[in-house]
Image (cartoon, rainbow, N blue to C red):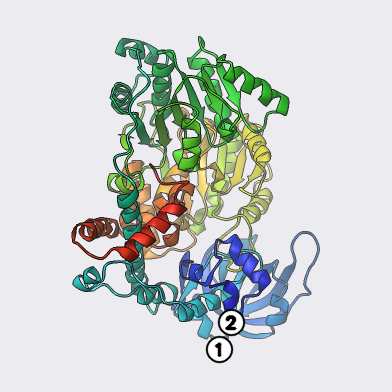
């Protein structure tokens, strides 16, 4: 059913929804809130700290004229709460000036306290005499274009009335376990009466989606093993000798991984292995040992990286550790002439190891005698892209790497038929990173410390969860707003702004300048989560830390502590809910990525691990839902029961095959 079936959605709003991946009324049902506002407790603005999120009753005294200068259209209101003066500002929302009049209101937004001037940024508001929209549990949705929370909430409510979603679980199984309907679960998630209802609805929806996914694997996968073609002749002695080229002793985990690759390459079937391990666990050294086994046996290898910054870093490593081999580099940033010349050299067999980005995947890149490929940061590539590389050879052995720790139980589901190697130890020389939760009362002290450290030659990261400050919610600080604030408060610190809307070339130049020490601090979104190695960076400050999954926080923290100097991670919290405190306290207490992953899975559910490009597509229908590991395991048991119990699986098979069709780029087959 087209979105235009909903009265409030015209052509313009239809395009805005499409940018969010919502193209039908049915899609709206799966467009789950990314957060909820619990508006049962009101606050006093007096005494609130910088970046606190508050719900207050107040008086709007007067409005300033709308300011249209510069890139932002700004609305400003002068307000008071029990005689305490403050201002409220809205960026790029000029319509607020028509909706807001002097009088009594409820405001919900983030406090900005600069030099004693208190401001609420982009607050949601409602007249105090009709506060039905600002009470109870309110869903908060991702936005795009001209969409507002009010528009999205109304559209979702209408979709719930128009569409009834049917379960594909065999009816006898639904009855046996007394499962609630999907429609009931959807109401609990989109229009909850209590916070407890949200988790009940999320568990039921996630159970259904995992059941369909696992059924798709059951129908399509299994028994697809390619017989080995390449005969590796490199000996264990030669591999050990190659490992001595590294300026450190391999850990037990690294040795185990290398041994497993060595055994795989002598097995009768082709290798398909995932090596996962924390940042700094030495996965790259393991991958280079695998490449050595290939080139030492007379074959060629390829190393695929997700960005040019990482590709250049890996190219330099390959040249250093394979001085007796020809290493070629191929990336989108090269000139047409350079690409043509490199492709000709590769096709002529002059290059032993091809290193680069997606440019390697192009059809006119021919790699003769290719036997071994490495995909760095596997979650940045769809399986179709990896297949495009492996198809440049015959029965190619594949090693994919991930620095995102995933609990073993979940990895068995997400990675299906891949053999999984987990490196749990770290090199002895790596220092522990000191992690602190910084209360807003100590925010100024933190900035003073960072200013002293950068003046002494150290470097820092400041990370925010969003780019713009005009999403209509105002409870999160944006990277652009933070950049402006820090420019005022840290005048002697050389700052650079970095975010995902920049062009790849611009991002690469900013990262290169940072690595070269030309800037002291990066003010960034999570684009630095997987990035260049900067040993001199010793400080990571993460804003609205409660809005990140623990595993994502762990990835961000891993950007520092890569050199010999003691490093620090500062967590700034915008919403101090009991759950946020528990999660961040657990994160503070350990640097073990797999322990953190297990805790994240326990507290926030598998959805956090399924937000990457690959697995996000795999389970995009449950993005933003929170559910426990028991839901995943229950779906697995139900799948086994459904296929072995003699039930009518007509509807299930249709849904599973449809799911598989959408996963051709991502299903690991």
Q: Nearer the viewer, residue 144 or 132?
A: 144
Q: How many marks?
A: 2
Q: Nearer the viewer, residue 202 or 477?
A: 202
Answer above or below: position of 361 versus 626: above
Q: Residue at x 30, y 21 (%)?
A: 266
Q: Residue at x 26, y 65 (%)?
A: 648
Q: How crowded is the residue under tag 1: few (<14 C-alpha within 10 Å), some, or many (20+)?
A: few
Whether residue 360 sits left or right of residue 433 in the image: it is right
Classify residue 142 by image quadrant.
bottom right
Residue 605 disc label? none
> Can the viewer see residue 188 in this picture?
yes
Whether residue 504 sits left or right of residue 355 in the image: it is right
Classify residue 345 by image quadrant.
top right
Q: How crowded is the residue under tag 2: few (<14 C-alpha within 10 Å), some, or many (20+)?
A: some
Answer above or below: position of 6 versus 311: below
Marks 2 and 1 sit apart, C-alpha to C-alpha, by 7 Å
Q: Which residue is mark 2?
A: 126
Q: Secondary structure at mark 2?
A: strand
In the rendered image, residue 422, in percent from the top left (x then y), is placed at 31, 35
Q: Which residue is mark 1?
A: 130
Whether residue 207 sits left or right of residue 392 in the image: it is left
Q: Nearer the viewer, residue 173 or 569?
A: 173
Tell me whether the residue at label 2 lies in contact with that at label 1, contact meaning CB atoms closer than 8 angstroms. Answer: yes
Q: Nearer the viewer, residue 223 or 150?
A: 223
Q: Quadrant of the C terminus?
A: top left
Q: Secondary structure at mark 1?
A: helix
In the rendered image, residue 280, in percent from the top left (x then y), is placed at 42, 32
In the rendered image, residue 67, in percent from the top left (x then y), is placed at 78, 68
Answer above or below: position of 637 versus 505: below
In the rendered image, residue 103, in percent from the top left (x then y), is placed at 65, 86
């Amino acid at each position: 059913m087209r979105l235009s079936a909903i009265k409030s959605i015209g052509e313009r709003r239809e395009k805005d929804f499409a940018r969010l991946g919502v193209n039908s009324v049915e899609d709206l049902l799966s467009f789950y809130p990314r957060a909820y506002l619990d508006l049962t407790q009101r606050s006093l603005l007096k005494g609130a700290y910088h970046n606190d999120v508050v719900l207050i009753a107040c008086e709007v005294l007067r409005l300033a004229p709308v300011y249209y200068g510069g890139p932002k259209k700004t609305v400003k209101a002068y307000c008071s709460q029990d005689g305490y003066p403050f201002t409220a500002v809205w960026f790029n929302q000029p319509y607020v000036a028509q909706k807001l009049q002097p009088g009594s209101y409820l405001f919900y937004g983030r406090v900005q306290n600069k030099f004693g001037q208190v401001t609420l940024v982009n607050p949601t508001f409602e007249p105090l005499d009709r506060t039905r929209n600002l009470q109870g549990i309110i869903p908060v949705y991702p936005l795009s274009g001209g969409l507002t929370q009010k528009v999205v909430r109304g559209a979702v409510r209408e979709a719930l009335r128009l569409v009834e979603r049917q379960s594909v679980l065999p009816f006898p199984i639904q009855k046996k376990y007394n499962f609630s309907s999907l429609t009931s679960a959807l109401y609990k998630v989109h229009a909850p009466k209590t916070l407890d209802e949200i988790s009940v609805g999320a568990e039921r929806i996630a159970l259904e989606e995992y059941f369909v996914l696992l059924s798709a694997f059951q129908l399509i996968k299994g028994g697809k093993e390619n017989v080995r073609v390449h005969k590796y002749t490199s000996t264990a002695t030669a591999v050990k000798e190659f490992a001595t080229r590294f300026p450190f002793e391999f850990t037990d985990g690294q040795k185990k991984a290398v041994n497993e690759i060595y055994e795989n390459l002598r097995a009768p079937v082709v290798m398909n292995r995932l090596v996962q391990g924390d940042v700094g666990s030495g996965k790259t050294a393991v991958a280079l040992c695998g490449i050595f086994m290939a080139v030492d046996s007379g074959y060629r290898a390829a190393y695929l990286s997700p960005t040019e910054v990482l590709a250049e870093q890996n190219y330099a490593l390959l040249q250093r550790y394979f001085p007796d081999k020809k290493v070629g580099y191929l990336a989108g940033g090269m000139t047409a002439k350079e690409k043509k010349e490199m492709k000709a050299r590769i096709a002529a067999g002059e290059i032993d190891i091809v290193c680069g980005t997606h440019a390697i995947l192009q059809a006119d890149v021919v790699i003769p005698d290719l036997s071994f490929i490495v995909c760095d940061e596997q979650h940045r590539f769809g399986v179709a892209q990896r297949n495009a590389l492996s198809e440049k050879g015959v029965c190619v052995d594949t090693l994919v790497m991930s620095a995102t720790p995933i609990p073993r139980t979940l990895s068995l589901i997400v990675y299906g038929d891949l053999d999984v190697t987990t490196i749990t130890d770290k090199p002895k020389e790596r220092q522990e990173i000191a992690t602190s939760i910084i209360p807003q009362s100590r925010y100024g002290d933190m900035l003073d410390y960072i200013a002293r450290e950068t003046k002494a030659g150290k470097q820092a990261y400041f990370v925010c969860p969003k780019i713009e400050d005009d999403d209509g919610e105002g409870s999160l600080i944006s990277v652009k707003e933070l950049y402006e604030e820090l420019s005022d408060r840290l005048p002697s610190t050389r700052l650079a702004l970095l975010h995902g809307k920049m062009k790849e070339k611009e991002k690469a130049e900013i990262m290169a300048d940072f690595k070269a020490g030309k800037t002291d601090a990066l003010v960034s979104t999570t684009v630095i989560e997987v990035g260049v190695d900067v040993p001199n960076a010793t400080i990571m400050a993460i804003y609205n830390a409660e809005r990140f999954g623990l595993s994502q926080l762990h990835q961000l923290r891993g950007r520092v502590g890569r050199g010999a100097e003691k490093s620090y991670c500062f967590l700034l919290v915008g919403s101090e809910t009991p759950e946020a405190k528990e999660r961040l306290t657990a994160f503070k207490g350990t640097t073990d990525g797999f322990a953190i992953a297990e805790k994240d899975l326990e507290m926030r559910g598998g959805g956090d691990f399924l937000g990457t490009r690959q697995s996000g597509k795999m389970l995009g229908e449950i993005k933003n839902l929170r559910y426990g590991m028991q839901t995943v395991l229950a779906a697995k048991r139900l799948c086994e029961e459904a296929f072995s119990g003699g039930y009518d699986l007509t509807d299930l098979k249709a849904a599973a095959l449809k799911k598989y069709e959408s996963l051709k780029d991502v299903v690991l087959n």
